[in-house]
Amino acid sequence: MAAIHITDIEAAINFWRAKKPSPDGITLAPELRALAEVYALMVFYREDEAAEEGFPAKAYAAWREWYDSTPDTPCIAICSTSQGDAVCKGCGRTFGEVQHWPEMSPGAKRTTWRRITLQGEAWRFNRYAERAGRGMGVAGDERPADAPTAG
């Protein structure tokens, strides 16, 4: 089962804070309120992740809008899994993740993004970082990844 990490919720909150700032410093946009409720419960219960399935509908819709603004794939068009590697040297995904990426849920994709970002061993994070930033990979990968922080 896929989960949404608290750092992704923080990123979505910051996305909405920039998109719909509070007019008076107190009032929150509906998207922010929905995400803030989930975030507060996670902090209260000391949880790092919330199950994607069962995520409150309004919070999930707000999170999805942020998610849709991020690159879909970590691919930089250097795929070593096609050459038989179990883990791609270019993006850091496993053969199974590369193969099943189109069917993966947004939460599962972000879980993969988080893992490869924290590992930081794929060429997209060192040797070809400029390529990842310029969007030289698969269509739709036009911005650098919003890398989640360790935590």
Image: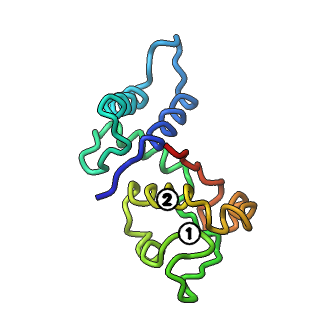
Q: Secondary structure at mark 2?
A: helix
Q: Position of residue 48 (x, y in %)?
A: 38, 42
**Position of residue 36 measured from the top left corner of the image (x, y, whole percent):** 39, 28
Image: 74 above or below 35: below
Which one is nearer the viewer's eye here, 51 or 101?
51
Left or right: 23 as drawn, with respect to 47: right
- At label 1, which amino acid type do we have? Gly
Residue at point 48% right, 39% down? 12
Circle number at residue 115: 2
Give coordinates of residue 99: x percent, y percent.
Answer: 44, 77
Q: Which mark is residue 92?
A: 1
- Residue pictured at 65% horizontal, 54% vertical: 143
Count the labels in the image: 2
Left or right position of 114 against 127: left
Which of 46/35 is in front? 46
1 in relation to 8, above or below:
below
Disc number at residue 76?
none
Q: Quadrant of residue 15?
A: top right
Q: Residue at x 35, y 37 (%)?
A: 59
- Identity of the residue drawn at 44% across and 70% down: 101
Instruction: Mark 1 or mark 2: name the one nearer the start of the chain.
Output: 1
Whether 79 is drawn above or below 114: the answer is below
* Residue 127, x across and y down, in percent: 74, 67
Q: Amino acid at mark 2?
A: Arg
Q: Are marks 1 and 2 in contact (CB under 8 Å)?
A: yes
120 to the left or right of 59: right
How many residues crowd around disc 2 within 10 Å: few (fewer than 14), some, or many (20 or more)?
A: some
Q: CA distance from mark 1 to mark 2?
A: 9 Å
